[in-house]
Image (cartoon, grey):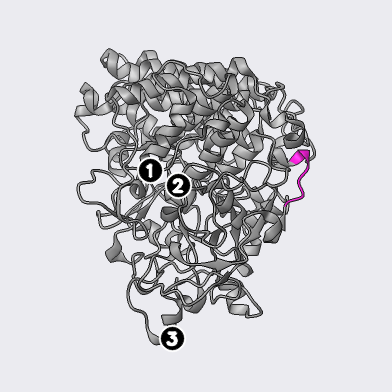
Amino acid sequence: MKKFINKYIIGVVGLTLSLGAASCTDYLDKSPDSDVSPETAFKNFTNFQGFVEEIYNCIPNKESNMWCTSFNWGEDELMNTGLGDNHVTAHFDLGDYRNWYGNNQSFLHADNPTPTSTDKYAHSLEHAWYCIRKANIGLENIDNLKDATKEEKNFIKGQLLFFRAWWHHQQMEWFGGIPYIDRSLGADEVFDLPRLSFKECAEKCAADYRAAADLLPDNWDNTTIGKKTLGKNQLRITKVCALGYLGKVLLWAASPLNADGNGGAQMGALKSGKTYVYDKALAQQAADALGEAIAHLQSGETPYKLAEYNYENIYDHESAKGSTSNFSDIFRTTGQSWKMPGTVEAIMCGPVPDVNGSNWNFAKLWGPKVNNLVEHDALIHMPSANYVNYAYGMANGEPILLADGSLNPESGFDPTHPFKDRDPRFYHDIMFDGFKFLNTTPADEDKPYQYLEMFTGGNMVPTGNPERNANGSRTGYFCQKLVPHQCNKYDGMYNWGGALQCYLPYMRVADIYLLYAEAGAAVSGADYKAKCALTALDAINVLRDRVGAGHVADRFLADSKKFMDEVRRERACELAFEGFRWQDLQRWLLLSEYPYNVKTRQEFKRVGNFDFKKNDPRDAEVTGFDPTIGGQTVLVERRFGSKHYLLPFKESEVFLYSEFPQNPGW
C-alpha cells in the first residue's frame, strides 16, 4: 500500500498537507491555504487517485496504536494486574469512558494525529473530519476530472462516497448521531450544524454507500485500471465492501439501541425483552443490502471468499496439505515476507506502514510473562472465562450456556472433561490447561511452564505469588487467535526470522454472513431470505460448516428470540477478540445486563496424572469445573448505567457551539 500511495501521490501531496489539523472545526472549515488547484490535483486519474489514497492512509491500525494497544472492551477480555490495571480496557471496566481521549493506547485517539504520516502511531479515529473534508472536496471537483475514462471517474467518485459515509459511520458507532457533513465548509460560515439522530445519520450514510456500490467494481484486478496495478489492489474499496457497510449501518440503526429513533439506552433490556426489539423496516433494508453482497460473493466475481479451516495441527495453526488458504492468515502471516494478512477473506483493511512492525510490541501482549517467557512489556490481553464458556459451545453446535447465563441441558457438555468436543474454533483461539506453550525445549528453569498449568493453584494462575498475579492468567485462559503461541522467547516467532505481520480487518466475509443472519432474524426469523440463495439460518450454518461444527439445533428455530440468541452467540464465537464486542453489546442493550457485565476466572482441579506430553490436553479429566458464572470467581463487575451506552465527546468539541451537545450523562 505504501508503494502504491507513493506512486499516485506525486504532485498532490503539497496540496493536501494543508488540510490536516487537530480539531473538528479546523478539519471542516475552509482556510485560505487549503485551496487546491483543480488543474493539478484533479486533472487525471493518477493525480486524483493520489488525492484519494491519502484517505486510505488515515485508516488506523487497531493493533498498532502505540506500544501496548487495546481494542476489546466488552466482557470478552481482561487485562493483567500491574500495568494492565491502568490500561484502556481497565478504565472501560470502571465506566471511565473519558479515558478514550486521555490515553493514547487505542485507535480512538492519538496524541498528535497526522493524516499524511506513514507512522502507525500518528493515526486514529480522530482523522474522521479530515477525511470527510477531503471526500467532500473531491466530490465537488469530480467534474474537473476530464482527462479520464468513465470507469476511472466512477471509481474515484465511488471511493469518495464510500469514505464520506465510512468516516461518519465509524464515529456514530461510538458516539451516536453527529452532524452529517456533505459539503466542504467555508471559514466565513456560521458553524451551527445540529447533531442528527443515529437513524438520520444512518440514512445519509446509506445513500452514500448505495451510490458507491453502484459505481465500484467487484474486483479491481478485472478492470482496465486495476490491471495496471496488479498485486496492489488488495486494499481497494469494492462493491461488496460498500454493500456490506450499507447493510451494517442500516442494521445498527435497526438495532435495539437505536430502534426508537433517538438512541435511547433503556435499562433492563434482557428481562423486559427490549434486547429483541428491532426496527423491522430498517432490518429488512439491511438484509436486502447484505443479501446482495452475498450474491456477489457467491458469484465468484469478487476476490473474496471464506478462508479454509483445515489444519494438520490446530494448536500450532499448521495447515493441512493441499489447503489453498488458512483461517489464521486472516489475522497474521508468518514466514511469508511480512505479507499483508487477510488472505481471501478480508474485505476492508487499512495500510500496514512498516515491515516487521507487529513484532514490537503487539506480538508480545498475549502470552504469559511468568519467568519472562514472553519478553518485554508486562501487559497481557486474556479472555474472560465467562466469555469463553458462552461463546465457544460444543462441536455438535449446542451452546454450553444460554443467553441468560444458565446451563443448556441439551449441550452434551461434560464438566469432568470440559475441553473435549468443543467448537473447533476453541482449539484455534484459546490456550487452556495442559496446552503446549513452548514447542522448543526450554531451559531447566522454564520446563515447568512448557505445558500450561491453568487449574486453580497451577503455575500460571494467580495465588499469593506476586509474580504469578501480575504475569500469569487471571482467568484460566490465554488467547492465540490473533498472535500465535510461538511468540515466546524460545520459539521466537516474534523475532525477525519469524516474518510475523499482524492486522485486524475492519470487515471480512464471515461478518457479512453474520450481519445478514441477524438482519433476517430481526425481520421474521430463521427462514428469512433476501436477495440471495441463503436464509438467515443458512448463513449461520455456512460458517459452522467451514469449521466442522454442528448446525443450529431445530428447537431454536421456531422461537425468533432463541434463534436470535444463537445468531448472537455465533457472532461472539466467530468474531471473538476482533474488537466488535463492545459495540454489539451496546446496540443490543446488553452492556449493563447480567451475565454480560461480569468477567470471571475459571476454577477447577486436575484429576490423576494425565501425561500432557503424550496426550491431547482436551482429553484430560478435571473436577470442580462449573461453566456458569455462579461457579467461577468474579473478577470484575461492570456497574453501568444508561450513559455508558455511548462514549462522551471531548469537552473541547461540545463547547464549540450550542447545537453540538454532549452525550447524556456526561
* 515 relative to 300 in the view: left or right: right
Q: Quadrant of the N terminus?
A: top left
Q: Position of residue 546 (x, y in %)?
A: 36, 39
Return the residue nearer the eye: 547 or 27: 547
Element assignment for label 2: loop
Q: Which of pointers 1 and 2 lies earlier in the amino acid sequence?
A: 2
Q: How far, Cα to Cα, is label 1 from label 2?
A: 8 Å
* Label 3 vs label 2, nearer the camera: 2
Label 2: few (<14), some (14–19) or many (≥20) C-alpha neighbours in 10 Å: many
Element assignment for label 1: loop
- The residue wearing badge 2 is 395
Q: How far, Cα to Cα, is label 3 from label 2?
A: 37 Å
Q: Quadrant of the C terminus?
A: top right
Q: Is residue 116 above or below residue 439?
A: above
Label drawn at residue 445: 3
Q: Is residue 95 above or below residue 373?
A: above
Q: How far, Cα to Cα, is label 1 from label 3?
A: 40 Å
Q: Which of pointers 3 and 2 lies earlier in the amino acid sequence?
A: 2
Q: Residue at x 56, y 55 (%)?
A: 105
Element assignment for label 3: helix
Q: Mark 2 belongs to which amino acid?
A: Ala
Q: Mark 3 belongs to which amino acid?
A: Glu
Return the residue nearer the eye: 409 or 269: 409
Most prominent secondary structure in the magenta stretch?
loop
Label drawn at residue 548: 1
Q: Which of pointers 1 and 3 lies earlier in the amino acid sequence?
A: 3
Is residue 640 a member of the stretch shown in magenta? yes
Magenta region: 638-643
